[in-house]
Image (cartoon, rainbow, N blue to C red):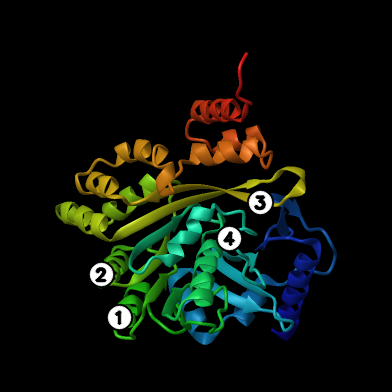
Amino acid sequence: MHDSKKDFEKLLRHCIEIGASDLHLSARTCPMVRIHGLLKALTAAGISPDLDQTVEAIMNPRQRKVFEQEQTLDLAYALPSGERFRVHIYRERGEAAVAVRKLESRFRTFEELSLPPQLKELSDLRDGLVLITGPTGSGKTTTLAAQINRINMTRSCHIVTVEDPVEYLHQNIKSLIRQRELYTDVPSFAQAVRASLREDPDVILIGEMRDLETTRAAITAAETGHLVFSTLHTGDTVGALDRMIGLFPGWEQESARHQISMVLRAVAAQRLLPGRNGNGLLPAVEILRVTPAVANLIRTGRPQQIYSTIETGVSQGMQTLEQSLAGLIRKGLISPEDARSIARDWRTVEAHLRRGEQALEPRGGR
C-alpha cells in the first residue's frame, strides 16, 4: 500500500512539473495527461502505479464502501507539499480507472480567469438561485470558487458549501465559511441543503443539482431568502432551464416553472477553448439574467424565445454564446476554427463580427 501510494504521489508531482491539468490512469494503457487541452501519452519510466493498490490506499473506509456500492467515487487528494487534486475513481471493463484534475493552489480573480465582468455582479446578489452550467471540465467549479471568494473578501456572511469533493479550501476572511463534503460529512446533497437551513446561512453553495431532491432543496433555500449557487451539466442557458424542469414529474412541471421563474436570478453557461499563442484555455460564456420578461417566458413555458431576449439584453448584462465567441475572435484570443467547433450558429457569429468591424471603423465625411 505504502509503495503504491508513493508511486501515485510521484506521478502527481511529475504532472505538476510538466504543467498537466489532468491525468488519466487505467489498467490497460500507459498514463495519459492533458496539457493545454491536448491529451498526450506519458511514457516516462517508473511512474505507473498499481491501480488496484493505489485506489485502495487513497480511500478511507467509508469511501471504499461507497465505491463498492456505486462503482464510482469522487474525492480530494493532497500531496504533503500542499498541492490538491480532485480524483474520480470508476470501473472500466471490470477494473479500476482514475481521472485526476489538478486544483488551483490559490483563488484567481475574475480578470485572471478571463471571465466576463458581468459575472462578478452575481456575487453581489442577496437572494435567489444562480446556476453555472457547462460540460465536464469547463471550469464551473473554478468560477463558483471565484464567486465565493469575492463574497468572502467583501461581505460579512455565513457561507455553507456542500461539495463532492471539497476542491478549494476557503479561509474565513470577512465571512464565516463551513465546507461539507459528500460521504465524509453528509450523506446526500439534498439532506445537507435541508440541514443547512437550520444553520443560519446567508449563502449556500451546492456542488451539483444532480437529482430532483437536490433541486427541490435548492429552490426551497432560494425561496426562503438565501443566495444559492449551484451547477448543472448542460451546454447552454436555456438547456439548463429545460433540464431543471424536466427533473420534475409531468404533473408538477407547471408549478415548477412558476417556482423557478420566481427564484432564478441568472444562468451562466461556460465552454473552454484553447487560446492563441499558448495562452492556455479561455472561457466562452453565455449569460442569462432573469428579468421580468425572462421570468414570464419561463413561467409560460416558452424557453426557446429566451435566446432572442439574451441577444438583445446586452445592456442588462446578458450575452449569447455567439456574441461571446465573436468578442474573443475580435480580440485575437481564440481562432475562428475553434470557435466554429462549439458555435450553435456560425452564421450568427459571422454577423456579429461584421457588425463589430463596422462599429470599429472611423466615422467622418467622405
User: In this view, which residue lies farthest toward the top?
Assistant: 366
Q: Earlier in the sequence, mark 2 or mark 4?
A: 4
Name the residue carrying label 1. Answer: 197
Total number of numbered discs in the rendering: 4
Residue occupied by mark 2 = 220
Q: Secondary structure at mark 2?
A: helix
Mark closest to the chain's N terminus, 2 or 1: 1
| Camera sees residue 78 | yes
Residue 316 drawn at (x, y percent): 40, 47
Of label 2 and label 3, which has the lower sequence position? Answer: 2
In the picture of the structure, the residue carrying the numbered disc 4 is 110
> Type of residue at label 3?
Leu
Rendered location of residue 245, percent (x, y): 27, 53
357 or 25: nearer the viewer: 357
**Image: 344 above or below 207:** above
Q: Residue furthest right?
A: 45
Q: Residue at x 67, y 73 (%)?
A: 105
